[in-house]
Amino acid sequence: MGGVLPLSLLLLVAAAQRAVAVSDDVLYQRTLPLAQLVRSAMLGSIRASWEQGVAASALLEFDYPAFSLFGAHPFHMDTSSPANAILPQSVIQLAASAVARQGDDGRLSQLVGDGNDAAALDGAAAGPAVLIGAWKPHPTRISYWQNAAIAQLNYVLNTAPRTSTGAISHRADAKQYWSDGVFMGPPFIAQYGAIVGQQGLLQIAFDQCRLYRNALMHDGPTGRLWGHIYSDDTKTFFDGGLWATGNAWAALGMLHVATAIEKSQFANNMRGQQGALIAWIHEVLDGTFKAVTNFGLVPNYISQTQSTFGDASASSALAAVAYRAATLWPDSFGTNYTDAAASIRGNIIDRLDPELGIVRPVVDPITWGATGPLSTEAQAFFLMMMSAWRDWISAQS
Ligand SMILES: *[C@@H]1O[C@H](CO)[C@@H](O)[C@H](O)[C@H]1NC(C)=O
């Protein structure tokens, strides 16, 4: 239809658009009490190293948006502003426990139960929270946090095994790529680089995303997606299945690295890397959103005949990525991404346990083919989805 719309029709369209915006805002406010319950169920859960890290990341976005990577000036906050003069307590509290349990080799959140993880990268997931203690306005213990962050950085850069391509192995005792690792290590390395002003660290974070994608990505029925685990020791996939949560970890990790690059002083030097990351986030969202089936959620494994239940855990994380990407790069991520995220979000909220705030149904984080009763990472992903939705809503007005 060409030409000019009649004024009455224009007013109607404008009113409808306003109604949509208002109702999203109202819906967000109505969902907040439930999100608080999801938050306390997350904090009530016993956590492994990577769960401590992702929980701290989720709290940062949910409780203290100005301090998060998605805030206006994550690496050079104006500390004279009263809004920034607060202590991001809940995040620092989780970081404190991660440092109290830091292993001798530098990995955070290790001294639990029998001792160190078999994972090389999982501990670093709490690294960004430790950086908040080290470099954001914080009256005490600065060197305590900085030493912890330096030891963790040293481990991932210099101690963890490397694969034949130079990728930092996800495992401490073998050379393996796990899609999960893209969230655990690279965002910490990138944020460290942005804070201390070292472009080389941002480049390493980018290269790690690239090397992991090269090793894991393959064709699936809905496009190219990431397989879960590839062994560089045996040159075979341990789990070549397109695990939805693994794809979600990869997309979240790349989102954090891309955002760190964009908000760093090196954004102009790194346009090419930035564009590649945006394309790779696109790839994951396209392949996973096209696979949405059971209960309107992304299936636990895409392209398999087994374990295809709709997984609220991966789905929350992917919806969070879609809202963030549409807010940061609206030219690349149109309304079809936020429409898909909104549909997923509604389906997840409908199925949430209203008594204990438990997100369901979710994959068991350590038995990838089965559903489990409680997933800390799913609780965190839900809070990331809420936070990304909140920030997308304010960007629309
Ligand atoms: C959104 O639309 C674009 C442009 O038509 C298309 O390339 C992309 O695959 C779509 N993505 C989703 C998730 O629907």
Image (cartoon, helix red, strand yellow):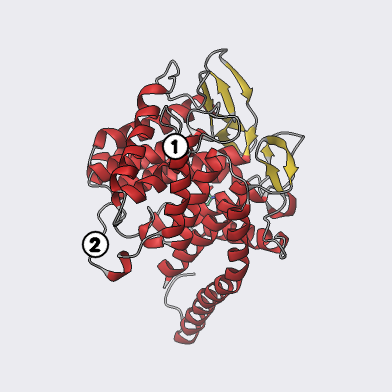
View extreme (top): residue: 234
Question: Is residue 143 visible in the rendered structure shown here?
Answer: yes
Q: Residues within 10 Å of mark 2 (few under 14, many from 20)?
A: some
Looking at the image, is mark 1 or mark 2 earlier in the sequence?
2
Where residue 306 appears, as percent x and y from the top left, is 77, 35
Quadrant (top left/top right/bottom left/bottom right) for the C terminus? bottom left
The correct choice, above or below, for 146 with respect to 119 in the image is below
Q: Which mark is residue 78?
A: 2
The residue where tag 1 is placed is: 124
The residues tagged by marks 1 and 2 sit, at their Cα atoms, a distance apart of: 27 Å
Q: Is residue 303 left or right of residue 58?
A: right
Q: Residue at x 58, y 26 (%)?
A: 229
Q: Is residue 146 left or right of residue 106?
A: left
* Mark 2 residue CB less than 8 A from any atom of ligand 1: no
Label 1 is placed on what type of residue?
Answer: Ala
Label 2 is placed on what type of residue?
Answer: Asp
Question: Is residue 330 visible in the rendered structure shown here?
Answer: no
Where residue 245 appears, as percent x and y from the top left, is 60, 41
Secondary structure under the numbered disc 1 in the rendered image: helix
Determine the image quadrant of residue 33. bottom right
Q: Nearer the viewer, residue 141 or 302?
A: 141
Q: Residue at x 29, y 39 (%)?
A: 193
